[in-house]
Image: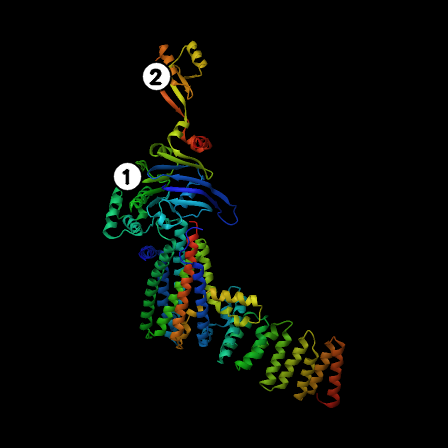
Amino acid sequence: MNTIFIITKNTFSESIRNKILYTIFGFAAAIIILSISFGEWSVFARVQVMEDFGLATMSIAGLMLAVFIGVGLLGREIESKTSYAILVKPLPRYLFVIGKYLGLCATLLLTFFLMALIFCITIVWLGGALTMGIATSILLIGIEMMIIVAVSILFSVYTTTTLAALFTLGFYCIGHYNDLLDVSVFEKSSPILVLLLKIVYIVIPNLEHFNIRAAVIYGSGMSPLYIGSTVAYGLLFVTFFLVLACNGFSRKDI
Amino acid sequence: MHLKFPVKSYGLAVVLLLAIAGLQTSITKQKSTLQTLENMSYLPQSDKLKPFLCGFHTTYAAFLWIKTILYFGGNTQLGTAVPWLPHMVDVVTKLNPEFFPPYEFAGLMLTQYAQDPKGALIILARGGAHLNKDRWKAYYYMSWIYNTWYHDTLRAADCLSMAAKVDPKQREYIISLAAKFYSRSNEKEKAIQFLTSMYDIAESPSVKRAIIDRLNKLTTQGKL
Amino acid sequence: MNALELVSVTKIMQKHFWTPKFIAVDALSFTVAQGGIVGFVGPNGAGKTTSIKMLLGLLAPTKGSLYINGVSAHVPASRKKVAFIAEQPYLYAHLSARESLILSANLLGIFGEEATTAVVAALERVDLASATNKPVKELSKGMQQRLSMASALLGNPDIFIFDEPMSGLDPLGRTLFRSLFLDLASTGKTIFFSTHILDDIEQLCQSIVVISHGKLMYNGPMKPILELGFAGTDIHVPLLADALATKLFEMGFTLTQSGAHDHILFVPKNLDPTHAQKILYDNGIFITSIQRRMTSLEDLLYRSPQSLASIFVS
């Protein structure tokens, strides 16, 4: 546990110095603040438009952070062999992967927290209310980003930095289109196709589950059971991808 | 292999997947259809959307079409309304006007489930202008809407006559139906005119015979 | 118990799935005893770095087994008392020299005051006390290599595995490393290092392991290698009279003129140089100098490593 904490701390201190982090954060913060003017254009529902823009910006900025920092940090470390500094020590390799993951998540969540703070201040300034729904929506975007970081780590273990970044972005897109694989539509197709679709439907997380922006903004809300299930669903996927990443990394020639 | 991951990782991965599968089903059931409904409120008009699709508008149309089916299926199973259905079908047909299934869907489902015969007619008219071998079906569904929803047999007859003229197989029942609808609308002259023009363009002897039968009946009995 | 042991280790590598496979290490077996300095030499591409990486668990062998202190090298615990330095210093650029060592110490289970003391001592031992708070990225390559050495010294390891540790060092740094190697060896530590600098091998190693094309060529003490390189004795004398020159030639010695006034009398290693000396003395010839004629270590180890096999077998 101590070793994981040491690697986590080192990863955090390394990634927090990453210039890309500040660039993306600055960009996201600017969009959140500028979305006040987008709200002005909409005549009605100024706060709603602002909330929508803000949450969407946080989601996209989170994705970019997860991809660039996640893939960049671990992938570069494997390629440049800096990881030798840790891997030649008498430690099982899975600790390195878990430590890296937690360090990246800590960086991501800190940045995310700051973005959320700017977002909330802007909402309050516009006269909007900070509802439980908004907090839940932010929470689920955070969980979604944790999945993306885990995926980026998994891809970094198996392929080059550039390919891992592309695959992670592709994974994000597929994850959001996963709804399309709802097998009930294909029930009358061949059983093999249905089975294949079922496997893909289960193995690739349905990232649309984490997108409750519309429901929150338009006030329909989501049940606590839904939120709980989705959080558990996300964390299970994080564990699943980390298990695969640890397994792959333990066997990798470095 | 060296450096074995201490946990029986594959077993753990399978257990995790089983738990995920269970949750996936549960979440999908819980997911409010309202969310899907509201998501569609972000779907812009096709003319605004098309420039952003960088030439992939037909691909996006296919994607949106599947979304439409899922939206429709999900809501009808739950018995909830589908207010965004006409807009979705409209965007699909504008992005890819040659794609037939959405027209058929518009003809049958928009009227029944979205209670929007007017929207369906607009979409089907687009099909009439863009489709090739299935063009007659667009007119056929239009006639069905005029007859069933507006009880306008004359317009239904006009649409059927268009369907008969563009039907590559020159189906006999469409020709008969068009003539019958003219007759029901007390437009005997139009019916004769239609049948005569169809006789000129018909290729099959059996169809020609059927048209002559109809014309005889119309002239002798005054109606069909 | 041997400090290091490789048993029929083979490593087949393939850069990409579309490129052909090649054998980096071919049924390699050797042992390194506890204590002392052992050189690991061979031409480029011989498989030295691959073997070292397998020992450290960074690469998995395709076949065979590797042991450190009797513990299988794929078990992380086998590296408990092992330190490593690579040719390139692999350090975290965002940390300072001190933070870098604290990280290493923590990973070895050394914390708090104990870690601080160990770090200060290690930095002083490699002459980096003045750069304690400098970021790693601002240190020169030589300084980074010294920092790597400081990191290796933490935790009092028993076995030091170095892969060309002196390649980026200036003469001062090299002298420092040499003296450190000798210090460590004098306290019973095992130092196993690969290098291309044969001078280091001659001066530091009691024994060497030579590999070529992934195969073992020699594993043993340095002395037989140096003897293998001994070709004979050169005796420098003033120009000799023809009669004496002929007599010496008939006895199996060869004579070559060196400059206008000197001859070099070469006594092959199978003949006794004292016999030649006696003849010269008896003829009143003054011997200017006597030298051993050696085949260079470079020729022995790199150009004809197969020749080592004969002494290795014997």
Residue at label 2? C288
**Secondary structure state at the residue bearing disc 1:** loop
Please state the horizontal and vertical placement of residue A181, each as a whole percent of the image: 51, 68
Residue at label 1? C187
Q: Which is more N-terminal, label 1 or label 2?
A: 1
Residue A70 vs residue C27, the one in the foreground? C27
Q: Nearer the viewer, mark 2 or mark 1?
A: 1
Identify the residue at image location x=67%, y=83%. B177
Q: Is residue A78 left or right of residue C150?
A: right
Looking at the image, the residue that sits furthest to the bottom is: B221
Q: Is residue C287 left or right of residue B205?
A: left
Q: Are marks 2 and 1 on the same chain?
A: yes
Q: Could you tell me if the residues under marks 2 and 1 are in contact, i.e. CB atoms within 8 Å?
A: no
Q: Image quadrant of residue C29?
A: top left
What is the number of the mark on residue A132?
Answer: none
Please state the horizontal and vertical placement of residue C68, each as a whole percent of the image: 37, 44
Please state the horizontal and vertical placement of residue C70, each as a whole percent of the image: 37, 45
- Colour scheme in the image? rainbow
Identify the residue at image location x=47%, y=41%. C27
Chain holding disc 1: C
Q: CA distance from mark 2 to mark 1?
A: 43 Å
Looking at the image, the residue that sits furthest to the front is: C1
Chain holding disc 2: C
